[in-house]
Image (tube, grey):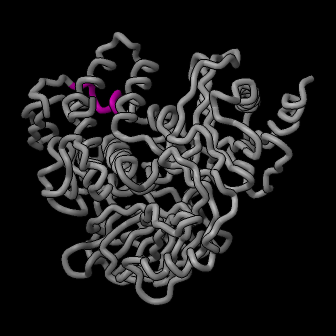
Amino acid sequence: MPRSLLALSTMVAAGVITAGAMALPAHSQPHAVQHATSVRDTAISHATANVTRHADTFGFGAGQTLHVKDVVIDANGTQHVRFERTYQGLPVVGGDFVVHQKADGSLKGSTHAKAHQVAPKSVTPALDSKGAAAGALKHSQGLVGNAKSTPELIVWAADGTPRLAWRTTVQGLGDKGQPHGEVFVTDATTGAAIENYDVEHEATGTGHSEYTGDITLDTTQQADGTFALVDPTRKHITKDARNASSSSLNSSSGTLFTDADNIWGDGRKFSTDRSTAAVDAHANTAKTYDYYKSTFGRNGIKNDGRGATVFVHVGTNWDNAQWSDSCFCMMTGDGNGTTDPEQVDLDTMGHEMTHGVTSATANLRYSGESGGLNEATSDILGTMVEWYANNPVDTPDYLFSDQSTPPWLRRFDKPSLDGRSADYWSKSVGRLDVHNSSGVGNHWFYLASEGSGAKTINGISYNSPTYNGSTVTGIGNQKASAIWYRALTVYMTSTTDYKGARTATLNAAKDLYGATSPEYATVAAAWSAVNVL
């Protein structure tokens, strides 16, 4: 047996491939692989062999270790194994790829992020961690009070040119007392800034305490006879953050909601009953879980059966909601205290938790066009949670966060109606805030779903234009969202831009419906209609 394949045979169970003699730190072993089925193990084994046999194709060489992040297996047996990599133990940003292979394990193709070769020219940083941390603290924005920084040496390859860099995370408090963090990436040789972005994925808006009428909650009865907001099926829990102004919220923080008679809340806005906000938060988290499970067979946000922690009453007069990967939790504030209650409606909860799905799959960078696609993904699939729930009080629509931010925060048929978002792609789109560059993806989704022109859907009037004056006929939002989800989980990578999203969704449409299908043609037509060619 060749030496390289012998090494593979001992490493497959751990979910990694190592070029050379490097070992994988124990904490880096993927959770999903630890709970893998035999079919997944076989797919991973085939993929590791394919990477080794075609090392030049994948840019796999000495000093690299590949980590299995996700595995998608189609009904016909086709396999898609997603890898991230390290170089000499350092995480590589922009070096991820997907191995596509037939049911028999033979290589079918691959999808790469920007970097092919990941070895930097220099392996000795000139700027030390103290200097990187000091610079990050100096330039952090939107943080008040004490802040702390944690630098990490990485290989930066998101632009296709690998080099050593410091990725420094600054954690502190925002102006409403909410946990807030920023990440600063600087060249470890020159000290030049590369990029910075928020740690959390936020949706700016307002909130209400009661959105979906009288609903059923899945709770757990405790040993003392009381009931707790612990979902026994989906494993998520809902807690009161007690207006915590600390950036250290984690799964053990806050106070679990309990009740003696299992009757929760009073259904009022600006309620003095703190459990009222928890009612919608708990129920809509469950709806999000059920949407992904019943529609795509996804078992939780990370597809590992793990439930999230949901916090309500975060900060003081914090008019926002966010998902945090670091604590695997959803956080919502109390609104502005005068006109805006809590933000726990269906599409907002679906939006924030979809950030967790994106992080666990394509991990679209929260910057530039990739960041716009990240936000569009949460808008699209968060909206589909609302369509899935089909609640008579919060009726399905293409107006994002219309319940918590009347009349709406963003809309899909013509995103520019908010005065900030882009209807169509242009060279400047990547310089917009990610919540506004998402308009291109949102507009594509509406056109692919419902088509162009004026129409009324569920009592709401829409009128969607096209960049090229074309007429687009929609395929329905279930098909359009299925195509987007497959593109996200199989074909998109961390650096996918809008042109790459067109390719990814066309590949997904071909897989699901065929290259000559009306669905494939509509995907292409909708992208052309938003000037993505």
In the picture, the quarter occupied by the N terminus is top right
Q: Picture quarter containing residue 284?
A: bottom left
Q: Quadrant of the C terminus?
A: top left
Q: Quadrant of residue 270?
A: bottom left
Which residue appears at 36% of the width and 52% of the height? 368
For the point 63% across and 66% down, which residue is it? 152
Residue at point 9% right, 34% down? 455
Q: Is residue 388 visible?
A: no
475 inside magenta stretch: yes
Looking at the image, is 138 positioned above or below residue 10?
A: below
Relative to the observer, which residue lies in front, 432 or 105?
432
**412 horizontally vs 327: left or right:** left
| Viewer-side residue, 226 vs 485 | 485
Q: Position of residue 23 (x, y in %)?
A: 83, 50
Single out the residue that lies furthest toward the top.
516
**3 sits to left or right of 474:** right
From the viewer's perspective, is 33 left or right of 426? right
Magenta extent? 474-480
Q: Furthest residue to the right?
A: 1
Q: Is residue 300 magenta?
A: no
Q: Residue furthest bottom?
A: 145
315 relative to 387, above or below: below
Q: Is residue 402 above or below residue 497?
A: below
Count of numbered badges drawn on the protein: 0
- Is residue 399 positioned above or below 54 on the image? below
Relative image position of residue 259 (x, y in whole percent):
51, 73
Residue 9: image x %, image y %? 86, 32
How far across and how far down the image is residue 148, in percent?
55, 81
Q: Is residue 426 left or right of residue 91?
A: left
Q: Residue at x 39, y 69 (%)?
A: 332
Residue 161 can be seen, yes or no: yes
